[in-house]
Amino acid sequence: MRAILTSLLLLMSLYGNATSSCQLLINGPNYLDHSIGSIKFATFNSSFIWLDASMGDRTASFNTNMDYEVVTGAGSYYFRLNGEAYNPTGTNQTYIYDLAWAFNMVPPAAGTYVVNAYNSTQNPVFYRYIDTIGDSITWWQQGRFFRCLMRDSGLHYDFKGTQTDVFGFNHDGEGGDTTTDVLARMASIPVSDAYFVLIGTNDHTTAAATATNIATISTQLSVKNPCAKIYISTLLPRNDTYNTLNQSINALLLSHGSFCNNCTVIDTGGYLYSQSNWATYLDAGGIHPTYAGYQLLAAYLAPLLI
């Protein structure tokens, strides 16, 4: 283990000055959680791994909150993943996707390797923390770039949360969550110096009910830390029939007044909607931003989250 960490520190000295935060760095405490054992990689690259069909369904062996060490004859390589799936028909293979490899270093070839799961952390940069709270928009697919792009756009916060994104930044996004779901898990959300709340597009109830729940979320966050800055985002536009509902929710949020002493409403949705080609910043499903969409939003938000 000591030799592995020494190698990582050497790599960090070589890559630590990289201009983008959108890379996996391991520069804090790194603890072995458990060994997964021998895993056969059939095909892989920097973005995905297909396990050999003989491995069966191994999705339960991987999750988004750990680093994974691949032990090879050439040394150890670390990656995180943004998702896993199993194809029960045809190839019968486990698929691990949206990967980030520590220091952008990938094993040299497919093969059978021992894989270990680690609990790893990153050393803070700013010693002040923000927790991004929401649904899949804040972390899944291209949302995995949300925090690192804001950091690259000048955000002067480290990240807190119960989950970890593919680049090692903590957050409190949960796929499919509604405002009611966030209220149900409020006790697990940690105390932070700031919170960014983007939630409600999955509610599909009334605009008034969603806006009321967002107000309650903001109040409960202010109880956690009365000094915390709480940034409440309006909902992003959708390229489907629920867009009208989201716009109605946004109107209520913008007209609500003060949610709490340190609460600020940011019209993120209005900013995206004001783009003449706003729909092109959403993916084919019409809900999640594309990478270009997250770049646009990160550049808009970073200077406002102070």
Image (spheres, rainbow, N blue to C red):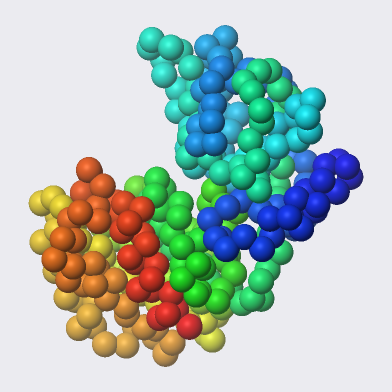
Q: Residue at x 30, y 54 (%)?
A: 289
Q: Position of residue 173 (x, y in %)?
A: 44, 55
Answer with left or right where residue 131 lies relative to residue 246. right
- Vertical comparison of 62 with 147: above or below: above
Answer with left or right where residue 60 lies relative to residue 36. left
Position of the N terminus by quadrant: top right
Q: Position of residue 83 (x, y in %)?
A: 47, 37
- Vertical comparison of 305 with 16: above or below: below
Residue 45 or residue 97, whichever sits in front:
45
- Vertical comparison of 13 with 76: above or below: below
Can residue 139 be seen here? The reply is no
Q: Residue at x 54, y 21 (%)?
A: 43
Can residue 288 be seen here? The reply is yes
Q: Position of residue 280 (x, y in %)?
A: 20, 54
Q: Residue at x 48, y 40 (%)?
A: 98
Residue 146 or residue 232, whichever sits in front:
146
Q: Quadrant of residue 219?
A: bottom left
Q: Position of residue 172 (x, y in %)?
A: 49, 58
Q: Residue at x 59, y 69 (%)?
A: 158
Q: Quadrant of residue 268?
A: bottom left
Residue 115 or residue 43, whichever sits in front:
43
Q: How many marks?
A: 0
